[in-house]
Image (cartoon, rainbow, N blue to C red):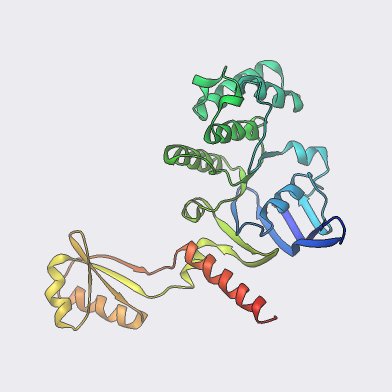
Amino acid sequence: MNAIEIKDLRKSYPTGHIIRKRITALRGISFSVKKGETFGLLGHNGAGKTTTFKILTGLIFPGGGEVKILDKSPDDLEAKNSIGFLPENPYFYTYLTPVELLQFYGGLFNIERKKLHDRIEYLLDLLSLTKWKDTRIGKFSKGMLQRVGMAQALINDPEILILDEPMTGLDPVGRKELKNIILSLKEKGKTIIFSSHILSDVEMICDRVAILIRGRIVETGSIEELLVKRSTGYEIELTANAKEWVKNKGLEYSPSGSSIIVTLKDFGEAQKLLKEAVNEQLEILSFIPRRVMLEDLFMEEYRKYEKDIRGGS
């Protein structure tokens, strides 16, 4: 079963005071997120990521298409209760403390008092907020606000977690901690959909991704599917004592600590070299496709789309 289903989703906004125009945010996007899957929605600023998330959470209405949360409309109360949402720029009442804020949000979900107290204590500890639990939120940094925002997104122990740029404002320690939390939630079978400009984090965490450019999805698939099919060759890692043997074959290598790496474009050539290395009883440390990075893939798709736009297509 899919946790989230989006079909031909469209949305535009009116703009201007005298001359009224419409800006198109989403141009008929379609994708689904399986239950228990971690899904990344990638795109530049203005691509339509936040608009998609706001439609999923029922904060705005679509201009067309179909959206289902656990086979229900985003307006359905049961669907809403199954979601935890962290917006890109969370705003909270600055005079509240983290405990007071979480009590407020827990009350919206009608969580029983004792259960809510235990849940708040757990989340404060999970997000390293216990020390500041009685400090007014108005004194918090951007990174601390993100931690509070993540706590409120988890207060109802949601089945589906929607995170809009969750790493924003976090220092390296905070980013590492949040990644670990997301991975632990993934292990518990939670469905997670999030956007991030830190593509290395997306590559590490996500099962599948969709690339959104100017309101259109241009690629969807697993990390392996998207990156391996764009393999730029094959890397063979050998111990350093194979240097002369590699040189005698007229091949170049790159040093890598106590080993060397030989890169070949053709699989047949790489396979032949492997067999010869085995016959020479050389120690082979690894043999892997040389993948492009997710960042490279995103930029490739972005440039391709911009070229099409300039060309009038």
Q: Quadrant of the C terminus?
A: bottom right
Q: How many marks?
A: 0
| Residue 296 vs residue 91, the one in the foreground | 91
Percent across and percent down for residue 51 are 72, 52
Percent across and percent down for residue 145 are 58, 33
Q: What residue is at 82 percent from the left and 37 percent from the top?
A: 77
Percent across and percent down for residue 278 are 20, 73
User: Is residue 69 in view from this perspective?
Assistant: no
| Residue 142 vs residue 49, the one in the foreground | 142
| Residue 136 vs residue 104, the one in the foreground | 136
Residue 250 lies, with reference to residue 236, above or below; the image says: below
Instruction: Decide if residue 248 is on the left or right side of residue 58.
Output: left
Percent across and percent down for residue 216 are 69, 66
The single residue placed furthest to the front in the displayed view is: 18
User: Is residue 254 in view from this perspective?
Assistant: yes
Instruction: Decide if residue 261 is on the left or right side of residue 181.
Output: left
Q: What residue is at 27 percent from the left and 81 percent from the top?
A: 272
Q: What residue is at 72 percent from the left and 19 percent from the top?
A: 112
Instruction: Decide if residue 236 is on the left or right side of residue 222.
Output: left
